Amino acid sequence: MTEIKDGDQVLFYLDARRNWLRRVDAGSSFHLHRGILQYDDVIGQEYGSLISTSLGVKVAALPPLPRDRAVKMGRQTNIVYPKDAGLILLLAGIGPGSVVVEAGTGSGALASLLGYHVAPAGHVFSYEIREDFAKAAAKNLKKAGLQEFVTIKQQDILEGITETNVDTIVLDLAVPWEVVPLAYTVLKGGGVFVSFSPTIEQTQKTVDALYTSHFTEIVTRELIEREIMVRKGKTRPETRMIGHTGYVTSARKVYPPKSNKPE
Ligand SMILES: C[S@@+](CC[C@H](N)C(=O)[O-])C[C@H]1O[C@@H](n2cnc3c(N)ncnc32)[C@H](O)[C@@H]1O
């Protein structure tokens, strides 16, 4: 049993569309359109408790999961959503102790999920070319309590990767194919390259570069998620869905270099 403490970040969940991540400070309150939540009524309760607003509406006070923090963090860039992040984590084999190089950091959403999964013994080195994005992402990672596991480097990754013997390279930037030769140099043998790109053209160029740089197991996937509305007697897919996020390309380093490009 874990008690909600003064200063904790809490996910207040009313329903799938109406939920909020808030820091609960003693003496403060949160105004919803369904009444006011006094944080003094929240502090000291167990996580998972249903708490009444001033209008008697029950709101669940949940401990935020890494995916909640990722999607709700302040953002100035597009982010990688949990659907694709889950696939990236699995393909990359990222776990406690992994050494990961990421670019670009963007808002830090994917970096936060990578950091959560490499902890406590691994580390993420995340390159971001823009100073304003690097600073905002650093704030987001600190809020998520993950700054110990993620180092944000305000640097153009194309100017060089200083880490060596890297387990995984994860990319979400405009020109991933230009990073491929560098990735080959710093990855361990068998190390994994993963790149997320919104367009087919980026994906094509990246896959070409992976063949040229002698990677193997080169696969591109698109994950399509469809939510199901479950109601008695009328269960069916939701009418609206997100049609497209991006393509995930993964590959592994082999050496000595071998030509494996299919015709
Ligand atoms: C779409 S955003 C990444 C979002 C991130 N995956 C997230 O989940 O928050 C792409 C980022 O790559 C950065 N970027 C572009 N080229 C770069 C480069 N050569 N080196 C480092 N960062 C770069 C951009 O400034 C931008 O912040």
Image (spheres, rainbow, N blue to C red):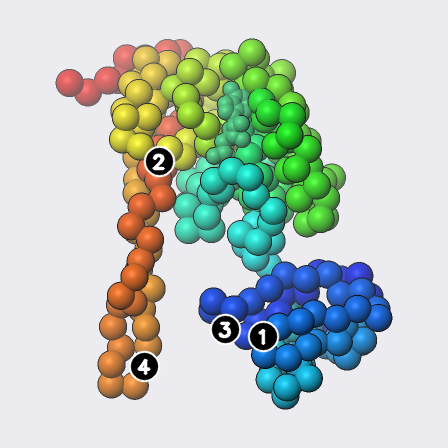
Residue 169, placed above or below residue 80: above
Closer to the camera in the image, 83 or 130: 130
Q: Which mark is residue 231?
A: 4
> At 31% from the left edge and 32% from the top edge, which residue is drawn?
199
Quarter occupied by the C terminus: top left
Q: Quadrant of residue 64?
A: bottom right
Report how far apart the C-alphas of labels 2 and 1 lie in the structure: 36 Å
Badge 2 crowding class, 10 Å Cα cut-off, few under 14, some 14 to 19, many 20 or more, is some
**Viewer can see residue 246:** yes
Q: Earlier in the sequence, mark 2 or mark 3?
A: 3
Report how far apart the C-alphas of labels 2 and 4 lie in the structure: 34 Å
User: What amino acid is found at the position of numbered circle 4 in the picture?
Assistant: Arg
User: What amino acid is found at the position of numbered circle 3 in the picture?
Assistant: Asp
Residue 178, placed above or below residue 71: above
| Residue 125 horizontal/vertical position (percent) | 63, 29
Q: Which mark is residue 198?
A: 2
Residue labelled with disc 3:
15
Closer to the camera in the image, 233 or 249: 233
User: What amino acid is found at the position of numbered circle 1 in the picture?
Assistant: His
Q: Are marks 2 and 1 in contact (CB under 8 Å)?
A: no
Report how far apart the C-alphas of labels 4 and 3 lie in the structure: 15 Å
Badge 4 crowding class, 10 Å Cα cut-off, few under 14, some 14 to 19, many 20 or more, is few
Q: Are marks 4 and 1 in contact (CB under 8 Å)?
A: no
Q: Are marks 4 and 3 in contact (CB under 8 Å)?
A: no
Badge 1 crowding class, 10 Å Cα cut-off, few under 14, some 14 to 19, many 20 or more, is few
Report how far apart the C-alphas of labels 2 and 3 lie in the structure: 30 Å
> At 57% from the left edge and 53% from the top edge, which residue is drawn?
72
Q: Earlier in the sequence, mark 4 or mark 3?
A: 3
> At 62% from the left edge and 72% from the top edge, which residue is drawn?
32
Residue labelled with disc 1:
33
